[in-house]
């Protein structure tokens, strides 16, 4: 017969599952395999036809859905795997303490900030590119982690410097593929910093970020 301890352990496991992170990874993966099945995710024309971000299509043709859909599109297996590993890592460490709803909202706000940061130079230079991927939103979530560590620095103790260095390394070197849109990364990170600085409030207990 299973005791109370077993049920408490199961309840703890359920509470620790980063549900929004898991859902986002599943959606991104399903979208990728569907697109691979019907076409070529490394073909820019195919990507444009299936929801990639392209400023003229948004501003001139009113296809505003691209602001969201491009965040779920990836070009090739390496692009998908790299981004999903990064998303899984950041989601595992912060979703429970930051809050699942806040995580989801900040993720999309960060993706929007990344899109705007990427689009503004294109508009000024009249030099437009096709943009895809979740990395801008993911950078926003790494920025959230940075704010959480900073605000919890008293509880985290002497190892905070090492943790911040690990986080910085993940943010800088975690997305080194060719063709990375660094303006999108910067926009996502800055947006995440702003949102988390306003929204995150340390709890009485220490957060569970461990490296």
Image (tube, rainbow, N blue to C red):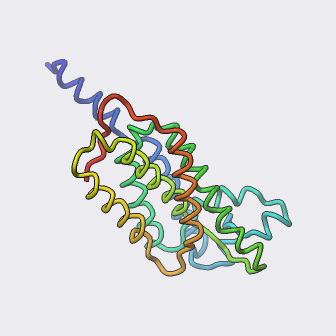
Image position, residue 130 (x, y; %): 67, 74
> For the C terminus, which image quadrant?
bottom left
Classify residue 136 by image quadrant: bottom right
Image point 46% across, 54% down: which residue?
143
Of 75 and 179, which appears nearest the observer?
A: 179
From the top left corner, tell me how far across and down residue 182 is, in percent: 55, 72
Left/right placement of residue 62 relative to residue 165 reads right
Residue at screen point 52% across, 37% down: 101
- Return the x and y of residue 106 as percentages of the image width and height: 55, 46
Q: How many marks?
A: 0
* Res. 29 visible in picture: no
In the displayed structure, would residue 61 be above or below residue 129? above
For the residue pair 162 and 102, the one nearer the viewer reads as 162
Residue at position x 28%, y 39% in the image: 155
The answer, for residue 143, to whether it is visible in the render is yes
Q: Specify whether 50 is left or right of 78.
A: right
Residue appearing at x 70%, y 71% in the figure: 48
Question: Viewed as shown, does residue 7 lie left or right of 126?
Answer: left
């Amino acid at each position: 017969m299973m005791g109370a301890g077993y049920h408490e352990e199961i309840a703890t496991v359920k509470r620790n599952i980063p549900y929004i992170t898991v859902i986002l990874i599943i959606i991104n993966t399903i979208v990728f395999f569907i697109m691979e099945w019907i076409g070529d995710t490394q073909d820019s024309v195919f990507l444009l036809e299936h929801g990639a971000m392209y400023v003229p299509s948004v501003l001139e043709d009113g296809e505003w859905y691209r602001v969201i859909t491009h965040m779920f599109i990836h070009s090739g297996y390496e692009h998908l795997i790299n981004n999903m590993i990064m998303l899984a890592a950041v989601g595992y460490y912060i979703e429970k303490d930051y809050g699942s709803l806040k995580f989801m909202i900040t993720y999309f706000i960060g993706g929007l900030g990344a899109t705007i940061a990427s689009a503004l130079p294109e508009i000024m230079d009249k030099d437009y590119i096709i943009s895809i991927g979740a990395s801008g939103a993911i950078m926003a979530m790494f920025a959230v982690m940075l704010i959480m560590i900073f605000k919890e620095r008293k509880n985290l103790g002497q190892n905070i410097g090492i943790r911040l260095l690990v986080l910085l390394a993940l943010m800088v070197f975690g997305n080194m593929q060719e063709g990375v849109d660094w303006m999108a990364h910067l926009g996502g990170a800055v947006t995440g910093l702003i949102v988390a600085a306003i929204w995150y409030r340390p709890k009485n207990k220490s957060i569970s970020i461990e490296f």
